[in-house]
Amino acid sequence: MPNSMAPVLNSPQSPTREIDASQSTEALIQLRQVSKTYSNGSPALTGISLSVNKGDFLFITGPSGSGKSTLLKLLYGAERPSDGEVLIDRENPARLKGNKLAFLRRRIGVVFQDYKLIPRRTVAENISFVLWAQGYSRGEIQRRLQPALKMVGLVHKADCFPEELSGGEQQRVSIARAIVGTPPILLADEPTGNLDPDNSWQVIKILKKLNQIGITVLVTTHDENLIRMANHPVVQIRGGRLYRER
């Protein structure tokens, strides 16, 4: 699938430039001069502008505390910008309430570093929970469950509890839970941060497979080796600003 952003991590000495404010009118995700300052006065992001088109796979890198997680929270509506505008398929989450905001959030799957699985629920129940909460029928939940389990290679673990799984398997469950509702956008916040290199690559391969079937994927990570292996476009957050790596 063609990518609207050229690969940007060509060598350790590659120059970088701050991303300008020009935006694509066809972008699925847009940030327009977005800044975020927390209530204690601490600035997290300053003047961020970014366009992500449908079908893109984008890595967002930067040191701990640089604002990577804040950027994703702005996209799925857990935080609101202090200035600027965030658009998801031309909708502004900050201006939506109630059912309209809930409907928009259903179009975004989120994967977290710490999995966030329910300990006393099986793999199948953890994945199904999000559909149950959205009011899907039992038959529709079952219809969607098996493809999600198959996508992450865990059909044989459906009746296991999280404590019976490895870290890599738990993260794959969280991916299945994020995509069981077939969202067009998947946000993964440091999804390999707690995993060894082999399991990290397994997770990235699943994300690449999801991207190949049309899901737009944004991944935050500080793992430079993983970024090089995956060979997808990269932007970096430094000092609260966003830079494209060439």
Image (cartoon, grey):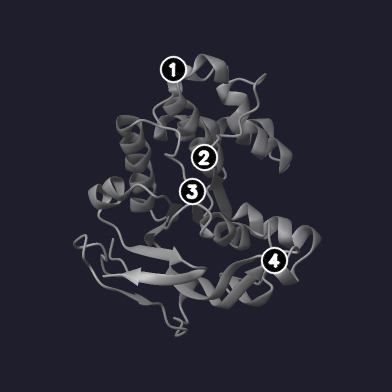
Which of the two labelled residues, at mark 4 and mark 2, occupies the earlier sequence position? 4
- Looking at this rendering, what residue extends furthest in the bottom direction? 22
Q: Residue 80 has which mark?
A: 4
Please rate how many residues cluster around mark 1, counting C-alpha atoms within 10 Å: few if below 14, some from 14 to 19, many from 20. few
Element at label 1: helix
Amino acid type of the residue that numbered disc 4 sits on in the rendered structure: Arg
Q: Judging from the image, what secondary structure is the residue with disc 4 in?
A: loop
Disc with the residue nearer the chain's start (4 vs 3): 4
Residue type pointed to by label 1 = His
- Mark 2 or 3, nearer chain start: 2
State the residue at coordinates (44%, 85%).
22
Mark 4 touches mark 2? (CB < 8 Å): no
Q: Quadrant of the N terminus?
A: bottom left
Q: Which mark is residue 188?
A: 3
Q: Name the foreground residue: 64 vs 94.
A: 64
Tell me which label, 1 or 2, sits earlier in the chain. 2
Question: CB atoms at circles 1 and 3 under 8 Å apart?
Answer: no
Residue under label 1 = 156
Sequence-first tag of 4 and 1 = 4
Mark carried by residue 113: 2
